[in-house]
Amino acid sequence: MSDLLKLAGQLRESSNQQLVELLHRRTVSGVSKDFFDLAQSLLNTRSIDQALTRLCASEVAALQAIANGHSAPAAAVASLRNLALVTETNGKPEPIAAVSAQLTTALALLAKGGRGNAASADYQASMATVFGSSMPAAPDELPNQEATLGLAAIAAFETQLALTELVLDVEQHLVKQIGKTGFGVGDVKRLSTHLNKSTNAVRGYFVLAQQLQLLQLNGERWFLTSAAQDFLNASVMQRWLLIATQWVRSLGPTGAAELLKLVDAASPDTPIDLNTMLKSVFPLANDALGNELNVLHEQAQDIGFSVHGLATSLLAPSLRGEFSVAAKAVENHLPAAQHSLIVQADLSLIAPGPLDTKTEATLRKFATVEQVSVACSYRLSPLSVTHGLECGLSIEEIRDLLLELSSKPLPQPVDYLLNEVQERFGRLTILAGNGASKAILKCTQGMLLTEILNDVRVRAFAFAPLTASSIATRFDPEVLYFALRDHGYLPIRIDAAGAVISPRAKHSWGLNTSALNQDPVEDLVARLRAADQKVGSQPNDQDLLRQLQLAVKNKAQITVAVSARDGSEVEFRIVPTAVANGRVRGLDKKADIERTLPLEKILRVSF
């Protein structure tokens, strides 16, 4: 039996939880209609290479032993089986030809120092770790632990705040899937400018947001999940715990255990070079596919697990699962939460220290962050205050909160801004249309409507006049809404009853929110099970033909259930050799004859 059929059978026998864990750790290209499609995707060269880069040293050694026909530790074999890198027959691990071939290539490149951009010496050290030698020594100088923890705590605070800003940015902009990374240059640059971070750092935040399942694709657009709303409502330390837990989970159970061994084995008087340790734990990781090590190392610095490349005291307890211990250390090195704000005449707001979660959540509804740090600066604008009103706040509530936080009368420009937004709120409204007019824009001021019609920046919407105060477009309401906001207008969305629709209400865009908040991997597993059950009970002609062609290609023995003339069901065990002219020919080894069976009489096919 071919590797494809063995792997497909193994996947079919796996539990749903095992399949979910597998698909979270492996890259699968294309749409998998059934377990054979999934097996084929997992045996794809790119998918195998990506899986090899995530193997820890003990798993690499076990995979090499299995490929050479030797025995390997049971724990490592189980891990490789769960990653679909080996198959098992009667409890004995068997190598997969495609995996063994790529492993041989990877090890050859590793021996030459040719994988990735790292120095050859580093990779030779990683190779030595696979075969039991010691790790290269870390730098000799021991940094001040208190100062290091202070820097780690600041990095952790800024990262959770940057992720919060990313969530709010996706909420307030139309972010579409573009290119290989899934996010366009314009979206990355906008957030980069907003956070005053490099574009590489912002792309790292997008990766982290996906890992945390804060973002999910629906069609061609990225939407926020219910986990994103929970993230916004969480405290600073709760957010950090989510991020830290995800980083440890991304190592895999074996990888986390091996990294912990290296950390524990290191001398307390010697600083730990985390990047070197990661290279030792994951010897086949390269820069060609996904920059796995770079992502892990950069995220470790963002979380506070390393400072200037050296591991902090937050790492070891987190690897042991003692996240509360690490969180307490981070919290002890951050300024206490405050309930004060400096409101300035230039419409900027300065928080001398981190705000308490409830205040921060409310403030972020009507103010944008200008500087992300322990001491943040915010800014009020017509657009930000309008967003606050859309989210259910009133001008009085905004004014009262600013007065409470500042403990002083508001500067005159701030009062003017709040009054102006209150007066203009609702002048431009967007509601869903029907037929060719998908969106209708209404305006209470004729001059503003004329300005929009003459604005070359929105000419592509090809507005068609309906009445003296309304125009229509063939574009969806959400597209019009975000485009007008990006060009400085302040539209709001309303429903058929005239009620304001909050931009945080995902049902407002006509989404299937249950599908949006469901893990897409779990949805894929459910579809695979449904397809498998269908093929096993009442398959259609296309399913049968696919199964037979697959059996012919792989020279696999199958059981064919055929309807006899008297209406009874007869089963034949054959090795099909050809499918043509509405018939399948195959060798029945038991009867030692060749059988020809009409496709129209075949009820089921099973391997």
Image (cartoon, helix red, strand yellow):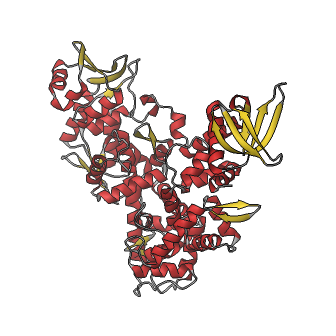
Please tell me which residue lies in front, 192 or 607: 607
Residue at position x 46%, y 69% in the image:
305
The image quadrant of residue 198 is: bottom left
Is residue 461 among what the camera can see? yes
For this view, does 177 lie left or right of residue 603? left
Count of all numbered marks drawn on residues in the image: 0
Q: Seen in the image, is 601 located left or right of residue 457? A: right
- Seen as rendered, the residue at the extreme top is 467
Q: Position of residue 498 (x, y in %)?
A: 38, 19
- Residue at left 77%, top 61%? 90
Q: In the rendered image, is residue 375 in sight?
A: no
Residue 471: x %, y % from top left: 25, 18
What residue do we see at 69% from left, 32% from top?
Answer: 599
Q: Quadrant of the N terminus?
A: bottom right
Q: Closer to the camera, 528 or 154?
A: 528
Q: Nearer the viewer, residue 40 or 84?
A: 40
Residue 464 at x, y percent in the picture: 24, 17
Q: Residue furthest front?
A: 593
Q: Reply above or below: 139 against 597.
A: below
In the figure, 267 relative to 494: above or below?
below
Name the residue: 62% across, 53% down.
4
Q: From the top left corner, tell me how far across and down residue 466 is, in percent.
A: 26, 13
| Pick the front one: 203 or 98 | 98
